[in-house]
Image (tube, helix red, strand yellow):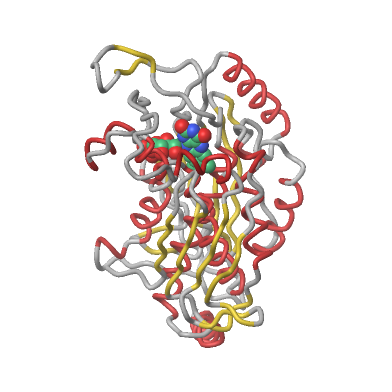
Amino acid sequence: MVAVLRYLTAGESHGRALMTILEGFPAGCPLVAEDIDAEMVRRQGGYGRGGRMAIERDRVTIMAGVRRGYTLGSPLGFLIRNRDWPNWEAVMAPEPGDPGDPIRRPRPGHADLAGAVKYGHHDLRNVLERASARETAARVAAGAAAAVLLAEMGVRIISWTHALGDVAMDPDRVPTGRTPEEAWEDWRTREAATDLRCPDPGAEEQMIAAIDAAREAGDTLGGVIGAVALGVPPGLGSHVQSDRRLDGRLAGAVTAIQGIKGVEIGEAVANARRLGSLVHDPIHPGPVGRTFPVRPTNRAGGLEGGMTNGEPVVVHAHMKPISTLRRSMESIDLDTREAVLAHHERSDVCAVPAAGVVVEAAMALCLADAFLEKFGGDSLCEIRRALQHYREGL
Ligand SMILES: Cc1cc2nc3c(=O)[nH]c(=O)nc-3n(C[C@H](O)[C@H](O)[C@H](O)COP(=O)(O)O)c2cc1C
């Protein structure tokens, strides 16, 4: 299945810049660089990040697809310059034939070894520069545009740090609100005052202590990101073909984020251990004047049969600990085959809060694609009309 909304990114971690092309975005949607920059800032934050984030001040330049603050229907092009580039120019752009100082000690858990074998690279920097999650800045730019489109349709995505290492938040503190807009605005305001994007201050304090202890030990941490899409109409995705199922598409988009190794939709893990009668969400008649049925619970996480069912789409993304450790792990020197410690370079101790912003972007891109598939339209007003007609039919 070819996506309606497609994107590509380019750029190395310490190269000149990152680039994004977003194709299939409708015309007539308001979009300014500030919408995207706000997400860039969120992606850079979070206690536990490394020195790089103190150097970068990510700002996007909209290179194509927008005129007078509105999208044109042509591909959107974004550029994010790397402020760190001048410090790396000699390493990243040496004279042709200059062997430099090749990296030959692959890090367990990173792309170094597999990438070098696959592409025949001698210098592992040729792999790690692109494998680095610096790429997610370009993905977040695309996701920010998709989120603006979804917001125009009344859909809001929020995420939070659910667990970090073995510290978990109180699940009753998951951000909510009367409307998608209210929930989004409320959490955005509260989130700005947190260190880790965790809605449970007590748990956040313990998470910070866990990061400090890991840093002290030269070690790293992962965690769990919670995310929800609110205001999603029923019927996005489809049951008719495996590659059209939205659960698979969402899981694919989220696990394609660097370091995310598991994704749970709804209460999938607990559901697998329960009786069916305690899992499936009953279907009740809607209140008078509202004909669409209501669901008293949402253990399915808003997805049944590969389609949205009108309930919030709930995802938990499981991130492994960062693989670049200051107390380097066992590896080998690829030249001598001797046992050595792995290469180390400036790195985050924990990037779960930042990864949450990337999860939002991945979900926004996936849901916006499913939206355009269902409601078509080359322009925002066509999509709005189709959505309104569909909602009336519900
Ligand atoms: C926002 C974010 C920041 C990350 N920062 C680092 C980092 O500083 N050092 C590191 O080794 N890995 C970092 N990672 C994870 C690696 O990029 C990832 O583990 C690596 O590319 C190998 O891919 P895989 O873990 O998906 O197999 C980060 C991931 C994300 C989402």
| Residue nearest the viewer, comparing 335 with 89 | 89
Q: Nearer the viewer, residue 390 or 319?
A: 319
The location of residue 292, given as percent across then percent down, is 51, 72
Q: How many marks?
A: 0
Tell me the residue at 74%/54% (across/down).
Answer: 186
Q: Residue at x 52, y 60 (%)?
A: 143
Residue 55 visible in this rendered orientation of the protein: yes
Q: Position of residue 215 (x, y in %)?
A: 59, 20
The structure residue drawn at horizontal position 58% and vertical position 83%, both measured from the top left corner, is: 28
Vertical position of residue 333 compared to residue 187: above or below: above
- Which percent across, then down, holds residue 350? 56, 31
From the image, which quarter does the N terminus lie in? Answer: bottom left
- Residue 347: x %, y % from top left: 53, 30
Picture residue at 57% right of the left edge, 40% below the top: 87
In this view, the residue in front, 301 or 189, is 189
**Is 331 placed above or below 289 here?**
above
- Please say if 4 is above or below 219: below
Decide if residue 297 is in sight here: no
Figure check: 69 above or below 132: below
